[in-house]
Image (cartoon, grey):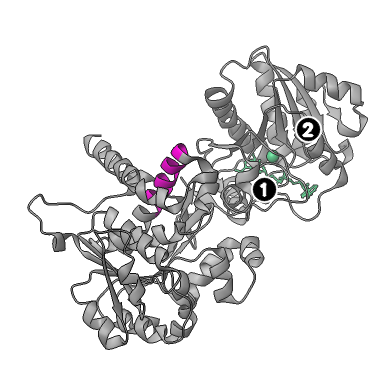
Amino acid sequence: MNVYTVEEMRERDRNTMIQHNMDILTLVDRATDEILDVLVSSICPQPEGKQFLVVCGKGNNGADGLSLAGKLKNLGSRVVAIMIQPQEFWSEEVRTLAHSLGEVFIWDEVSVERWDEWVAGSRYIVDAILGTGCRGEMEPAVAAAIAQINETGLPVISLDLPSGIRGNNGQACEIAIKATYTIVVDGYKTGNLMGSSSVYSGELLLTKEVGLWTSSNPDYKKTMLERNQQKLPSRSKAAHKYDFGKLVVIGGSRGMEGAGFLAAMAGLRTGCGVSQLLSCENWEARKMSFYPELMVDTFFDHQGLMEKLKKTNAVVFGPGTVYVERDVEYVQEIMESDIPLVLDGGAIPLLNDLRDRIQLSKHRLIVTPHTGEMARLFRVTSRDVLEDPVYFITSFLESYQVDLVMKGPCTVIASGQEMFFSYGPNSGMATAGSGDVLSGLIGGFLAQGCSNEEAMKSGVLVHQEAGNAARKIYGERSMTSTDILSNIYKGIHGLEQTIAEDVKG
Ligand SMILES: NC(=O)C1=CN([C@@H]2O[C@H](COP(=O)(O)OP(=O)(O)OC[C@H]3O[C@@H](n4cnc5c(N)ncnc54)[C@H](O)[C@@H]3O)[C@@H](O)[C@H]2O)[C@H](O)CC1
Ligand SMILES: [K+]
């Protein structure tokens, strides 16, 4: 399943029209065939006899609304179509579609009584006011319509994007539609997945492809992260624990020992044979092991560290550390050895100190910032990153030449010329230690010999599924990172099952 920016979507529209000799009306017609298919199969199996209140804008999102209204009418639904803007502002396509629909009302001319009557008689509102074209300040008439729709309490079906959500970053305008379902046309827009979109979109439903031109060589190929792309490391029944790899987590400084333990334990739960927490100058950590299956040790200088990293197959550096300049040397030493390395938490800011030396790394580094950590690296604010996440992800790849896992309600894995989006909003994951569990998972898979890409994908998928399982038991409010940790096995089972089905399949 592909993901596009608004600019890429426009380019696809343009090239489809030129190369396949298609006009906008044909594109809209194809899009609404697929929208109707999703509506009937996933939202309203029997639309005949039911009333749909379809509220349309003057652009192509509005054209989608009018075209869908016509098709619902043909199926025997009752349709009330309202245009927000008066006729003189309609596009050519909107004009044609409105004409063939017959009766279309204009927002400003609708009395309160009529609106109330339509709302009372309708089963659904279709929001076709704004799609990917939303930009700048909201027109007052549009804002008023959105507020009024949000107040009805009726289920709202948004077409492509909830009106007022920006197509590239998912940020909400001063007001936006609170949808029950969002039917996304042809491919996810980055704005369907990022920013505040999860607060407004309701259930995201994707149409089949509508036959648009697709670049065979985009700058960055963007797809949804899917379970069936994964393969887990194989396991021999005759194995020794070291055959499954040793992970070392360097972290757990004074007062933050728990972060180190969570990461080390998450690694062990992926199936690696041995996991150790190494703390710098923290003897206390050795006394506080919460988990008997973990090894815990302390180091004082880089000779001591490298001595302790013998027979280590992967290192996660940073859960429960703060930025200390001295750590640059430690990280550099590990980079130059043959050990795959994940930089997380307190080690992420070291990236700016290491910039000139990253090429010396034998393995490509993996770095796992959340948006705040990403912003600090670029010396901008989180708001800047949220404003243009795709730009910052590509800049990150280009500036640092490392692999990236940017954590958030939609976690993005980025490597080389590819990005994978993992959309699974769960507010329970925004809890202390959740990121430590993720970096431990990635480290655990690396220690078993997975490639960076496999380890990042498996780590993110398992983390998300473990979080969903924890939510089922404790709820989004009460779940903690220990609950994510203890549900890792469910994420692993999920992946094992998918793989088994694929093999059978
Ligand atoms: N790409 C596809 O596969 C297809 C997409 N389709 C649909 O078309 C929309 C995008 O259409 P576009 O005309 O570019 O934009 P919109 O309809 O979203 O809106 C443009 C319209 O609205 C005005 N406007 C912009 N911002 C605001 C604002 N803040 N307040 C008020 N008005 C605003 C702007 O001036 C324009 O006039 C896409 O999402 C799909 O739904 C088709 O189905 C074809 C295939
Ligand atoms: K919309």
Work out which quarter of the rendered image holds the C terminus and state it: top left
Q: Give percent across and percent down for residue 118.
A: 81, 20
Disc 1 beta carbon < 8 A from ligand 1? yes
| Circles 1 and 2: CB atoms closer than 8 Å | no
Q: Which residue is identified by label 1? A: 132
Q: Earlier in the sequence, mark 1 or mark 2?
A: 1
Can residue 425 be seen here? The reply is no
The residue located at (56%, 18%) in the rendering is 45
Give the Cα distance between marks 1 and 2.
Answer: 24 Å
Asked if the magenta segment contains residue 468, the reply would be: yes
Asked if the magenta segment contains residue 266, the reply would be: no
The part of the image, by quadrant, that contains residue 77 is top right
Q: Residues within 10 Å of mark 1 (few under 14, many from 20)?
A: many
Query: Looking at the image, which is closer to me, 391 or 355?
Result: 355
The residue located at (81%, 49%) in the rendering is 138
The residue located at (22%, 82%) in the rendering is 307
Q: Residues within 10 Å of mark 2 (few under 14, many from 20)?
A: few
Q: Secondary structure at mark 1?
A: loop
Q: Which residue is identified by label 2? A: 151
What's the residue type where badge 2 is placed? Glu
Q: Secondary structure at mark 2?
A: helix
- Residue 243 lies, with reference to residue 331, above or below; the image says above
Residue interval drawn in magenta: 460-473
State which mark lies toward you, 1 or 2: 2
Figure label count: 2
What's the residue type where badge 1 is placed? Thr
Query: Looking at the image, which is closer to me, 238 or 264?
Result: 264
Q: Give percent across and percent down for residue 473.
A: 44, 38
Please state if 469 lies on the left or on the right of 293 as rendered.
right
